[in-house]
Image (tube, coloured by chain):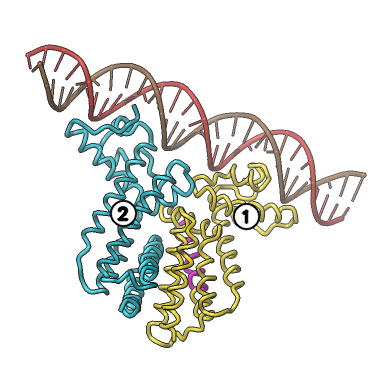
Chain colours: A cyan, B yellow, C brown, D red
Amino acid sequence: MGVVTAPKQDRSRATRQRLLAAAVACLAEQGWAGSTVSAVAERAGVSRGAAQHHFPTREDLFTAAVEYVAEERSQALRALPTQDRTAVVAALVDLYTGPLFRAALQLWVAASNEEQLRSRVTELEARVGRDTHRIAVQLLNADESRPGVRETVQGLLDMARGLGLANLLTDDAARRDRVVAQWAGLLDEALG
Amino acid sequence: MGVVTAPKQDRSRATRQRLLAAAVACLAEQGWAGSTVSAVAERAGVSRGAAQHHFPTREDLFTAAVEYVAEERSQALRALPTQDRTAVVAALVDLYTGPLFRAALQLWVAASNEEQLRSRVTELEARVGRDTHRIAVQLLNADESRPGVRETVQGLLDMARGLGLANLLTDDAARRDRVVAQWAGLLDEALG
DNA sequence: AGCAAAACAAGCAAGCATGCTTGCTTTGAC
DNA sequence: GTCAAAGCAAGCATGCTTGCTTGTTTTGCT
């Protein structure tokens, strides 16, 4: 009762998947308040009743969606190719511009107000954040034993977050590219 | 009709002010969806009817609140003291940690989904962003005629935004201080 | 002091999202 | 082929927020 049990039928699993994907898309496009279960169900191509069969309450649905977003983001992270530092910086920043980041951003802001979501989303961000930092250090070929290197990389990721946030309203890819180019150079000097 | 006319009575102006301040506080604490006009009116200490007398529709209220936030942020910006670069960086970052930034963040995210808000909030961010950049260049004593300096400062402000965003869920002032110290050093080298 | 206008308070109807309940269809096993 | 269980669809009741409408108090001016 209440425990999310592993689905036993293929159709059910497919529907669950579609519902979660639709939930993430709705979050990215219409935000938290606009992501009503009717909207998610309609986008997933199922009835609202079906949605509430898989996720009895709206909170259940988006609790699962949080995990889904975390999984997708980790997956995108691991798909990053190894290149020169400028390309790596650009690729990292690109992680914060897609619909996945938009959905995550909506979840962060919603979690800052909804008690129920806060703990789960905080855990998500901690986990994904650690993964991101680890992979960033690896891809940038940074030596974390040197003092300041850890903070430099953290600042870079914070800058990427900020660029993604600025990208929420106005799609300023041109400005972003210039900033990325400049700071990739500064970073290259700082990391040696 | 519909045009927000200048209030003629002192009590009215005070109530308007309290309503706007309460709207900003509600935004920062309870987000966009949670900032119902009842909540704002209660926080302002007036009845809901009074709130709807001053702002006939909810959109009117928060349209005015957007302007209010922009004004407050510009004011906070101009109050920044001139100090050494590390202190200036810390002060700039601090601009992105208070309730004003939280309210602005809620507005950004809400505006990314609500058509009506988007244009106004976009204009707000453009204006405040320009002011912030200008004052940052001035306080940092940066020579924008040198290539790359403009992008360097922009990247710093983007990092500040990202730090503020990270601060939304977990109040990690310690990490922020370390990142600020490190990036202040990087910036000092880059600006010469 | 009186008066008109503004400011404020309270109640009412409409719209919407959620959660529950009921009934029908599909699945997979015997 | 049948049957029980899971998946799915639709309708209903509740609670909440908004906007409007009506009535009362306060303000500023003559």
Say which of A27 and A1 sits in front.
Answer: A1
Task: Report whether residue A170 is seen.
Answer: no
- Which residue has dot 2 on it? A100
Kind of residue at disc 2? Leu
Residue B114 within the segment the image draws in magenta = no
Give the left or right position of residue A118, taking residue C27 as reference. right
- Which residue has dot 1 on it? B21
Give the left or right position of residue B16, taking residue D16 as reference. right
Say which of B22 and C3 sits in front.
Answer: B22
* Magenta residues, start to end: B117-132
Between marks 1 and 2 in the image, the one whose residue lies nearer the viewer = 2
Q: For residue D28, which quarter of the picture?
A: bottom right
Q: CA distance from mark 1 to mark 2?
A: 33 Å
Q: From the viewer's perspective, is residue A3 above or below residue B14?
A: above
Q: From the viewer's perspective, is residue B86 above or below residue A107?
A: below
Say which of A108 and B68 sits in front.
Answer: A108
SS at mark 2 in the image: helix
Kind of residue at disc 1? Ala
Which residue is pictured at 53% across the width and 75% down the height? B88
Query: Are labels 1 and 2 assigned to the same chain?
Result: no
